[in-house]
Amino acid sequence: FVDGHREPFTAVAQPQITMGRQASDPNTATAHIDLEPYSAFDKGVSRMHLTIRRVAKGFDVEDLDSANGTFVNGFSLAPHAPHQLKNGDELRLGDLRMHVYFLAETEVAER
């Protein structure tokens, strides 16, 4: 959920996604979320701001050397240093705030 917006956006991080304020490049296999509809330029979001990657323990976020930084729950991330994301974390890209929620896949036991 992006602060100030009622509707969430969804993304599948298989194996990773990037976020920023540019349209996705059809020549790459990496999915990209364009945050421009959320006033990303005015809030200091870089064109290629961060990556969210699926890892064995869950999800990691990594700042891509953005101009105005990436923060998790107020903690500033060092560029290119993965940081574990947890359900409900506040993610801030420059001044663009959002809360991250994960939907887990569930397996039905065979009888």
Image (spheres, rainbow, N blue to C red):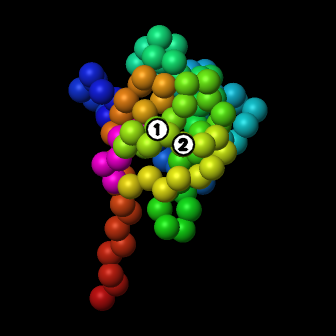
Q: Is 80 or 52 nearer to us in this picture?
A: 80
The residue carrying mark 2 is 77
In this view, 91 is above or below 2: below
**Picture disc at residue 36:** none
Q: Is residue 64 magenta?
A: no
Q: Which residue is drawn at the image coordinates 55% and 25% (left, top)?
A: 68
Mark 2 or 1 closer to N-term? Answer: 1
Q: Which residues are magenta?
A: 87-91
- Tell me whether circle 2 and circle 1 mark residues in contact (CB < 8 Å): yes
Q: Is 101 or 67 nearer to us in this picture?
A: 67
- What amino acid does circle 1 point to? Phe
The residue carrying mark 1 is 71
Q: Main secondary structure of the magenta part?
A: loop
Dividing the picture into quadrants, the one containing residue 67 is: top right
Quarter of the image with the C terminus is bottom left
- Label 1's element? strand
